[in-house]
Amino acid sequence: MMSRRRARISLAAVVLAVSLAGCAAEENAPPSATPTPSQEQTQAQSETPAPESEETMAETPIRITVGEDQFDAVLWDNPAAQDLIEQLPLTLDFSDYGGQEVTAEPPQPLTMEGMPEGESAPAGTIGYYAPDEVVVLYYTDVPRFTGIVRIGEIHGDVSLLSGWDSSQPVTIEVTS
């Protein structure tokens, strides 16, 4: 009788061990083709598109006029750009700075709240340089620099902005 009891206990132990091994195998197994509700949630989260970049966010079309030349451009939906939009239309005296950009001071400084600490500025960028509180139209590429924030972009040949010997009036206005 004792050996039968030991056999049953041994059998029960084997069954238990096999059952536990099966559970562990399921935990380490690759996900099944039919996702569980928690897998579906994880997949949905991973397929959610990343937040839109500044360039693909809502844009406000503007026109920049320099003498007889006009540029179509956009200001992006960010706090600094919104501050500038609220001040438009404007005619400002822009001057060349460093052979890479023209700058002018808007009537009111633009906010830096919610803006990055610094960015690069490819040619054609409309930017704001916070330390000097100036709007900047870049006609050459400028590497990342603390204080530069991008607020929009100019469409067209921005080389017309280079080589200025003196300041020039530039009008910036919202278009439809």
Image: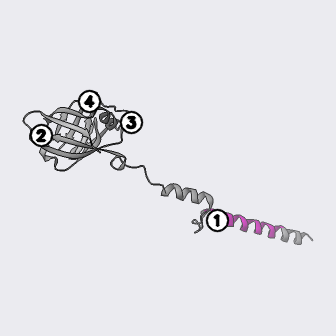
Q: What's under tag 3, amino acid-wise?
A: Gly
Depth check, mark 3 against mark 2: the one in front is 2
Q: What's under tag 4, amino acid-wise?
A: Pro
- Image quadrant holding the N terminus, namely bottom right
Q: Work out how far the residue at label 2 is from the one at label 1, CA to CA, in angstroms.
A: 73 Å
Q: Earlier in the sequence, mark 3 or mark 1?
A: 1
Mark 2 touches mark 1? (CB < 8 Å): no
> Which range is magenta?
9-27
Q: Work out how far the residue at label 3 is from the one at label 1, CA to CA, in angstroms.
A: 46 Å
Magenta span dominant secondary structure: helix
Question: Seen from this angle, which residue lies furthest front?
Answer: 176
Residue that mark 2 sits on: 67
Dot 4 alpha-carbon crowd within 10 angstroms: few under 14, some 14 to 19, many 20 or more: few
Q: What's under tag 2, amino acid-wise?
A: Gly
Dot 2 alpha-carbon crowd within 10 angstroms: few under 14, some 14 to 19, many 20 or more: few
Q: Is residue 16 left or right of residue 86?
A: right
- Which quadrant of the view contains residue 165? top left
Dot 3 alpha-carbon crowd within 10 angstroms: few under 14, some 14 to 19, many 20 or more: few
Residue that mark 1 sits on: 26
Looking at the rendered structure, the secondary structure element under dot 4 is helix
